Image: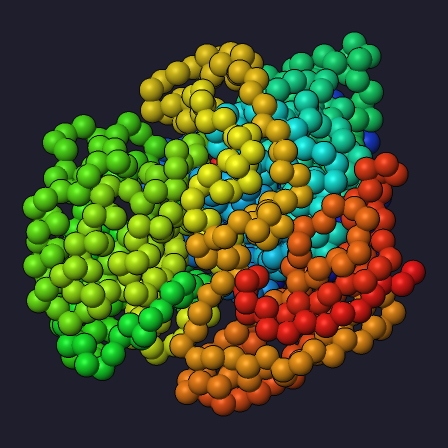
């Protein structure tokens, strides 16, 4: 293993140290050598680099000894080895670590955890001989129903940006490049292959592009994946405004772009619109590209620019030699440890009337609900992980309960909506009696009766509800956010049988808890939490550690309250999903030509982001719409006291200091959050916006001085008239607290120019 990392270090030496240069400019250190290489290459050799070689690789320059580029899906587990398609090869050493999914990582609000997550992914990527991880996935969670909410980080651009930067640095330091995806405004799965997203420039800049901008400028991300959708009329893979003007022009990106799989739609459009590599296929960036150059339509220099950008990444990331890659298991104890630490910090205590932690008096627990035994690594399409192992919630609870001498009984409680695993057709055969055919199927009377009997006989009930990866998945959005398969009926019956109930929600996105909440005195958001998720959950439930996760998105009371729904601008009449078609190539034998014809004739729906900058809590706060659980919310087993704020200005930075005290009886982490409210702004603003946060560990009774800082430039808005950032002077109120709806201290100051 050592050799792999030595090689990564060597890559930096080859490139020189680049001290004092921006992370992007450092990528240009080998440009002289790269230009010499390009000068020796034929047009055919160059174009060979600009499309897929296999489903997960693109060609190097074999004649000159330059290796292919090998890609792997992330973002929270290195994907199992597939053939030239998506069918697993059945290797024995390719079991990876399943890390907590995107929204779980974001719930830690921890830059340190994001850095470690990136690092661990990068390490496992190298063990598998990969150059680029297709991740992190950093789109803003615009819709509560979003099929990829669980992959994405947050509804807030500052939280998503900070974590994206750290993940990027971590992975690239370990020697594997990241590929930020999906650039940009891929916020719905419905018609993702062709939907035309209409968003104004201010909305794009202040909300949707922020995480990408930060990961590129501060993190030095080497690769970007233009998304499937269109933005303001142009496919992302040929969107010159996004790729050339903003990404390369304004942000100084020096790396390469690779289209999402099947997301390239033209030769000239994509060539001039900033795409480097067509994934997958070569119908646009193969012979057609050669012809375009030969007949004078496209200058060869455009092709050279793409080759240069690819080679910059190739020289920054040392290829792992064939005889070094895949010699030991992908998942290793030190990377599993990272997944475990993230899981410990991600679990969110949403509500607690004293039922948690589990009292010493509890001698028998009834664990009810199939989500307690569900494993969550596989499924969900591209982001599924072949994990080395996975501790389910029930296993975690059983192990911990045994140590405490507590008895655990389990009943499935409800049928679960059928899991669609793997890439082939669903297996034929008898329907499993524990499987529901639709998410609205009511509770099964026999399962319900069995669960109620267990609840009556126990001192406490832990109910596992939520969704699964067939309900929340790439390729489609949920129809609603209701708890599926009669879970509401089950919780009511359980509560009536035994009111000492705690609910654990196993899901990646928000659910409608209006019915459940009165019947559940404690509620925990347990996420899809990686291979040690069950262990971490048991530690929280039994009070070994205090819960410390905070919501990275809002739980609205009802779906209709959320901005896109309230404004009626999210249509859900989807056509067939583009990626699902691509995997049918494996499953049903469609020809590549048939699929390409389908892609060429995709429908043309529009999604207009009429809510503008009022995304997530920015909307609920500004429009005074009550929510179930607010952005940033998360309780602990202790209380924290926030002292008064002092605000100092240092050049263009605001430094806000206060004392934070843990007044409880155990060590705990608090995520402190700083929001800014503009008092006298002349332009439309959300009521308040997150500007800084930190995670602080405090022993029982301990107090610490905390400083949160942000720069004035982060308070600038994008001015539509001048098409640039403008910092408006005026009064601001700084709000510091434990959640967006739990502000403890405030102070006024101003911005003077
Ligand atoms: C997804 C990407 C993924 C790619 C390769 C696409 O359908 O949108 O996130 O990286 O497939 O599997």
The reply to whether residue 319 is visible in this rendering is: no
Between 311 and 439, which is closer to the camera in this rendering? 439
The reply to whether residue 470 is visible in this rendering is: yes
The residue sitting at 68% across, 23% down in the picture is 234
Side (left or right) of 140 relative to 635: right
Task: For the C terminus, give its image quadrant.
Answer: bottom right
Q: Place residue 173 in its image quadrant.
A: bottom right
Query: Going by the picture, which residue comes out furthest to the right?
Result: 753
x, y percent for residue 513: 36, 51
Side (left or right) of 457 relative to 747: left
Q: Place residue 541 in its image quadrant.
A: bottom left
x, y percent for residue 586: 37, 25
Between 392 and 89, which is closer to the camera in this rendering? 392
x, y percent for residue 601: 54, 12
Q: Is residue 207 positioned above or below 582 on the image? A: below
The residue sitting at 38% across, 48% down in the picture is 511
The residue sitting at 48% across, 53% down in the picture is 627
Side (left or right) of 250 relative to 633: right
Q: Place residue 303 in its image quadrant.
A: top right
Q: Is residue 735 positioned above or below 67 on the image? A: below
x, y percent for residue 599: 52, 17
Between 501 and 126, which is closer to the camera in this rendering? 501
The residue sitting at 34% across, 42% down in the picture is 482
């Amino acid at each position: 293993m050592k050799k792999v990392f030595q090689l990564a270090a060597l890559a930096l030496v080859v490139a020189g140290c680049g001290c004092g240069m921006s992370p992007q400019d450092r990528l240009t250190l080998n440009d002289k050598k790269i230009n010499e290489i390009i000068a020796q290459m034929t047009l055919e050799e160059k174009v060979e680099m600009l499309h897929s070689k296999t489903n997960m690789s693109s060609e190097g320059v074999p004649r000159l000894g330059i290796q292919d580029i090998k890609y792997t899906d992330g973002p929270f587990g290195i994907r199992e080895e597939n053939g030239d398609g998506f069918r697993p090869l059945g290797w024995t050493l390719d079991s990876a670590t399943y890390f907590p999914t995107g929204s779980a990582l974001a719930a830690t609000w921890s830059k340190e955890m994001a850095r470690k997550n990136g690092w661990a992914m990068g390490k496992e990527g190298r063990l598998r001989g990969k150059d680029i991880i297709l991740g992190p996935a950093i789109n803003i969670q615009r819709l509560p129903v979003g099929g990829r909410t669980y992959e994405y980080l947050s509804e807030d651009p500052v939280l998503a940006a900070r974590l994206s930067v750290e993940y990027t640095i971590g992975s690239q330091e370990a020697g594997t490049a990241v590929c930020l995806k999906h650039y940009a405004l891929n916020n719905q799965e419905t018609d993702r292959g062709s939907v035309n997203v209409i968003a104004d420039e201010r909305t794009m800049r202040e909300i949707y592009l922020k995480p990408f901008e930060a990961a590129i400028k501060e993190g030095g991300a080497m690769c970007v994946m233009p998304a499937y959708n269109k933005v303001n009329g142009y496919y992302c893979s040929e969107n010159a405004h996004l790729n050339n003007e903003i990404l390369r022009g304004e942000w100084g990106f020096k790396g390469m772009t690779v289209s999402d799989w099947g997301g390239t739609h033209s030769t000239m459009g994509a060539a001039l619109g900033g795409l480097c590599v067509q994934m997958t296929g070569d119908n646009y960036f193969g012979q057609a590209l050669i012809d375009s150059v030969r007949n004078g339509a496209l200058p060869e220099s455009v092709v050279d620019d793409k080759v240069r950008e690819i080679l910059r990444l190739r020289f920054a990331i040392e290829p792992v030699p064939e005889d070094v890659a895949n010699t030991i298991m992908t998942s290793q104890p030190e990377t599993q440890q990272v997944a475990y630490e993230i899981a410990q910090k991600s679990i969110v205590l949403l509500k607690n009337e004293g039922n948690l932690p589990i009292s010493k008096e509890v001698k028998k627990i009834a664990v009810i609900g199939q989500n307690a035994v569900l494993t969550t690594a596989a499924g969900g399409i591209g982001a599924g992980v072949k994990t080395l192992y996975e501790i389910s919630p029930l296993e975690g609870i059983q192990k911990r309960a045994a140590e405490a001498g507590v008895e655990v009984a389990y009943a499935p409680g409800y049928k679960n909506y059928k899991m669609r695993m793997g890439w082939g057709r669903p297996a034929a055969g008898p329907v499993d009696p524990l499987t529901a055919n639709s998410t609205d199927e009511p509770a099964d009377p026999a399962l319900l009766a069995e669960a109620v009997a267990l609840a009556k006989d126990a001192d406490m009930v832990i109910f596992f509800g939520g969704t699964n990866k067939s309900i929340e998945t790439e390729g489609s959005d949920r129809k609603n956010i209701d708890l599926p398969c009669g879970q509401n009926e089950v919780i009511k019956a359980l509560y009536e049988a035994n009111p000492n109930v705690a609910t654990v929600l196993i899901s990646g996105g928000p659910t409608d808890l209006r019915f459940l909440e009165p019947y559940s005195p404690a509620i925990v958001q347990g996420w899809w939490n990686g291979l040690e998720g069950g262990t971490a959950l048991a530690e929280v439930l039994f009070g070994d550690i205090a819960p410390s996760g905070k919501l990275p998105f809002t739980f609205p009371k009802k779906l209709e309250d959320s901005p896109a729904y309230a404004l009626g601008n999210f249509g859900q009449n989807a056509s067939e999903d583009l990626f699902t078609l691509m995997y049918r190539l494996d499953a049903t034998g469609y020809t590549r030509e048939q699929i390409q014809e389908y892609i060429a004739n995709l429908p043309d729906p529009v999604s207009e982001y009429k809510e503008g900058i009022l995304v997530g809590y920015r909307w609920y706060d500004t429009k005074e719409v009550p929510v179930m659980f607010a952005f940033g919310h998360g309780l602990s087993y202790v209380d924290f006291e926030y002292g008064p704020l002092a605000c100092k200005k240092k050049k263009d930075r605001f430094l806000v200091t206060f004392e934070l005290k843990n007044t409880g009886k155990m060590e705990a982490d608090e995520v402190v959050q700083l929001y800014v409210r503009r008092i006298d702004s002349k332009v439309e603003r959300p009521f308040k916006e997150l500007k800084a946060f930190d995670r602080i560990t405090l022993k029982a009774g301990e107090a610490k001085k905390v400083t949160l800082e942000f720069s004035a430039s982060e308070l600038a808005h994008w001015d539509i008239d001048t098409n640039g950032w403008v910092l408006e002077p005026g009064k601001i109120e700084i709000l510091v607290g434990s959640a967006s709806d739990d502000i403890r201290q405030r102070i006024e100051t101003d911005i003077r120019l």
